[in-house]
Image (cartoon, rainbow, N blue to C red):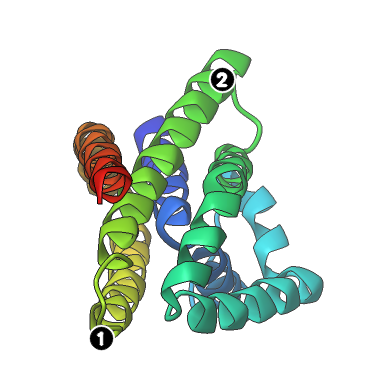
Amino acid sequence: MSVIDQLGVALGLATLAGVNLYLTVLVAGLAIRFDWIGLSSSYEQLSVLGNDWVLGVAGVMFVIQFFADKVPWLDSLWDAVHTVIRPVGGVLIALAALGKMDPAVLTVGALLAGGASLATHGTKAGVRALLNLSPEPVSNSVASVTEDGLVLGGLGLIGLFPAVAFVVFLVIAVLCAAFAIWLWKKIFRRRKRRGEELATA
């Protein structure tokens, strides 16, 4: 198993954790628990995702999130709280995927994983913040289903082509970081403008 393959798995899981941490852990854990995928010795530490307690907590949290992200104000609150939780979760999963490697590689992997999780979380939260300003609830549901589909597709890519996943998720992380910065600037300008309009009304 090459280092690039392991970095691909680690970076991929971390990137997807920024979108939906609980679904990422749940599906990866189920795949491990029921032997849908065989873990090589390189990924031995990832077997923790198949633990009954980990699966149970991930499943319960995924169900809560599934309903929470359909309610605009609750969705925004949920994303705010997960600004810390998703990147930390992404780093922990990535370190488990990297296993016992050179400390320098682990450090680089942790930095990439944290940045990737934060970038995808920032993009998701920013898009949702804009959607939550919309008066109709349909867009939130569509966004939620789309996000879940992207996570499942991403997990498939990681399982089949980890080296390709490394390149794909590295590009996604960079693009998401740039997009998230632009998006949040736009959101803050819009809110500032709305506040000024209300103040002069």
**Residue picked out by circle 1:** 138
Q: Is residue 109 visible?
A: yes
Q: How many marks?
A: 2
Q: Write the residue at 42% across / 48% down.
A: 9
- Look at label 2 and name its amino acid: Thr
Circle 1 sits in a helix, a strand or a loop, which is it?
helix
Which residue is at the front of the view, 149 or 130? 130
Residue 109 at x, y = what percent?
A: 49, 28
Instruction: Residue 130: name its quadrant.
Output: bottom left
> Badge 2, how many Cα within 10 Å: few under 14, some, many 20+?
few
Circle 2 sits in a helix, a strand or a loop, which is it?
helix
Which residue is outermost to the right? Answer: 53
- Look at label 1 and name its amino acid: Val
**Residue picked out by circle 2:** 107
Give above or below for 4 relative to 53: above
Q: Write the residue at 47% across / 35% down.
A: 113
Give above or below for 85 relative to 23: above
Relative side of 100 to 167, left or right: right
Relative side of 51 to 181, left or right: right
Q: Is residue 86 visible?
A: no
Look at the image and tell me in which quarter the N terminus lies. Answer: top left
Q: CA distance from mark 1 to mark 2?
A: 42 Å
- Marks 1, 2: nearer the viewer: 1
Residue 147 at x, y = what percent?
A: 32, 69
